[in-house]
Image: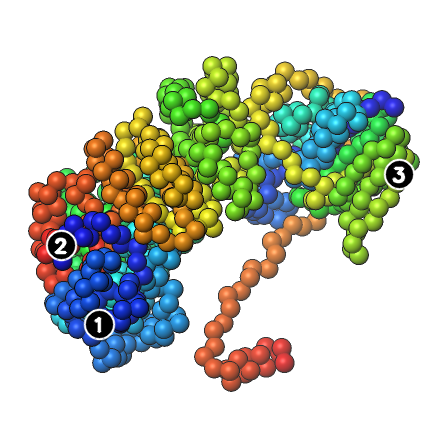
Amino acid sequence: MSVSACFATSAYCLFSHGSNSPENSEAEGSSETSMPPQHPHMYSQTFTCRRPQSISRLRLRTVCGLHSKILAGRTITDPDLLESSNVDWLKTVKGSSEVLLRPQTTEEVSQILSYCNSRNLAVNPQGGNTGLVGGSVPVYDEIILSTSLMNNILTFDNISGILTCQAGCVLENLSLYLEERDYIMPLDLGAKGSCQIGGNVATNAGGLRLLRYGSLHGTVLGLEVVLADGRVLDCLATLRKDNTGYDLKQLFIGSEGTLGVITAVSILCPRKPKSTNVVFLGCETFEELLKTFQLCRGMLGEILSAFEFLDSECMRLLNTHLKLPNPITDCPFYIVIETSGSDQDHDSQKLDNFLEKAMASTLVTDGTVATEQSKIKDLWSMRERVTEALTHDGFTYKYDISLPVERIYQLVTDMRQHLGDRAKSVVGYGHVGDGNLHLNITSPAKDPALLAAIEPFVYEWTASCQGSISAEHGLGLKKRNYIYYSKPSQAVALMGNIKAMLDPKGILNPYKTLPDDLK
Amino acid sequence: MSGRVLVGVKRVIDYAVKIRVKPDNSGVVTDGVKHSMNPFCEIAVEEAVKLKEKKLIKEVVAVSCGPQQSQETIRTALAMGADRGIHVEVAGKDYETLGPLQVSKIMAALAKKEDAQLLILGKQAIDDDCNQTGQMTAALLDWPQGTFASEVSLDGDKVKVVREIDGGLETIKISTPAVLTADLRLNTPRYATLPNIMKAKKKKIANVKPADLGVDLTSRLEVLKVEEPPQREAGVKVETVEDLVGKLKETGRI
């Protein structure tokens, strides 16, 4: 199988259990043998994901072994219960795992991995299963290792703001806990009600607050990780500064479960702002939007905590599918600005000055402001629920791209022109403050011809600006083979070396993150 | 007819905030807690502004009774389209014991003073859930009342009000001047847009004291205790149907 075949076709096919029958043209590999499928027409149509000889097939006695030895009562084999853990949130990829394990302690995770490593059994770590690149669900029958029951908060120091907790804590629950103590999590994303902090760290999630508080690479102070062979790596320091040797935790942040299973996190949390304002503005052109951003940075700099945008197509989807009305008049572009500070009067003053300037200079054609919790939530929904609105519009092709800020919308315009009326909707929104575009395209049903038009056009466009083909979603299953558009081969080869060193048998989340041609 | 509509707006704890009871059970914690306009009052303001936009009335005056911060609530009403505001200053102990009876007396006095054609209030406040101010004010003024309004239409000197009642909807026709109270489905309050927020800064808010209106603020009610509702207990999982039946018998459910 050639690498170029992988590039040309998409990863968005439903992987179903076993069969080699011609009707099931999207089936990939079989659990009967570890040889690739024999039907030639399947190669050209589908995306091949070769199951290494080294990975063992799951046998019933293995399952019983796991059940009785390690996790009595928390080993799930019921197919109905397994269904939701085998399918990703977007419902675009499906695995055929037969076992879901739910450990409660690091010790249990260590026993599981030690057991699996010795028997060459593949393991798929899973948190909230909200990932958007198919990295959180099995491809074949990998054992799902869920962190859902590891949801204890361990310590919180309200002087330093350092929180330590198990990896399965749901982000929203951590936020609620901290808010009662006058702190907040340094990250926030639309999936907060379901995503778990371990998964957030494994994906190096970005989110809505990155502009103000930075990335997890900076806010995570320590990690406890269980390695592929079951060894527990305790780097769960709670120190702000510690320059003693190589900073190992950085390797695991963003490793998408391929280098180790994160079991505990220590993270630096900021104080809860006393004053929060959200502004929703409308702009005529993207150039004016960028000028507004510059004005905003200049006049609100130290209190600015988010700067997001969405286009009129996004607004149309919100109106149509979620019945959310436009808070202001219809404009081509919308901005959501959030300020967070320690003094309501000072911040209102700064905000008023900025708004007067923005309106007077006609950079902004309309807008509204919210200071109350309930209104703030409503305005934020306009940005946070676009992803949801898209799922109602049809099959969604999602692209999460980092570009030079001034070129962000050009990609959307070019894509619209390039696709013409082959696509149903082409929308752009995202963390414009961070140079991160979420480009989404929909069609009534999955359409391989449309996909062929989108990819590799979108990746080549991105590479031509030295951008990233995955700004914050990660590579997972779907984007692993496109890594070369944003990283040189030398770098990817070195990643392969590190993987081989930490997981020599390749049991941790195989078929994810690193490209197939590394084997 | 004066064409003037008075709208009462109350400053309450924002509905999205988690309420906490004071340790001494004397009330809820309000210090440092986010406040905003009572949602039903927003609906009342929206209705008044709509009537003005339809040119059925000439002026919308927003009124609030409370401490200094109540002015913010009036500003929000101004940003939504009210023309001017009246802040009735009530602070300290008087504010703690301020209830529907006193507010009704204030509203009645102002309605007469301003020669209002209509007085529109929210049906109830989300902090005390009293649902009394509109009705008491109408009684003090001896005006007709259209409460729990989900639809309002002006017709000369009469008002047609569709009311939400337990059995469904009731339509009544009352003469003006009248008191109306807004229910949830009356309208969807607009977001205050920037140009209006800017304009609102220049609109006038008059300061009035209850004594100037001849109103006595003494309360006849005393709050004895405020407590949280009983904590919701965790559910119990059972393994078999027999266990379920057993548990139900145990707790005396069957």
Instruction: Identify the chain of the residue marked 3, using the numbered disc in the image.
Output: B
* Horizontal arrangement in the rendering, residue A387 relative to residue A461 (left or right): right
Q: Is mark 2 on a helix, strand or loop?
A: loop
Q: Position of residue B221 (x, y in %)?
A: 77, 44
- How did the renderer colour the structure? rainbow
In three-dimensional space, the C-alpha distance between marks 2 and 3, rounded to whole angstroms, equals 82 Å
Label 1 neighbour load within 10 Å: few <14, some 14-19, many 20+: some
Q: Position of residue A408 (x, y in %)?
A: 33, 31
Q: Residue furthest bottom?
A: B242
Chain letter for the residue marked with disc 2 in the picture = A
- Residue A108 falls in image quadrant: bottom left
Q: In this view, does A193 lie to the left or right of A434?
A: right
Mark 3 in CB contact with mark 1 (< 8 angstroms):
no
Query: Which quarter of the figure has residue A505?
Result: bottom left
Which image quarter holds the C terminus of chain A? bottom left
Label located before the other in sequence (2 or 1)? 2
Is B179 situated above or below A31?
Answer: above
State the residue position of label 2.
A2
Judged from the image, the secondary structure of the residue bearing numbered disc 1 is loop
Kindly indicate whether the residue at mark 3 contacts the one at mark 2 (C-beta within 8 angstroms). Answer: no
- Give me the disc on residue A486: none
Give percent across and percent down for residue A30. Answer: 22, 70
Question: Label 3: which residue?
Answer: B174
Name the residue tied to disc 1.
A31
Q: Amino acid type of disc 1?
A: Ser
User: Which residue appears at 40% of the width and 31% of the height?
Assistant: A307
In front of the other: label 2 or label 1?
2
Residue at mark 3 to residue at mark 1: CA–CA distance? 77 Å
Q: Nearer the viewer, residue B85 or A467?
A: A467
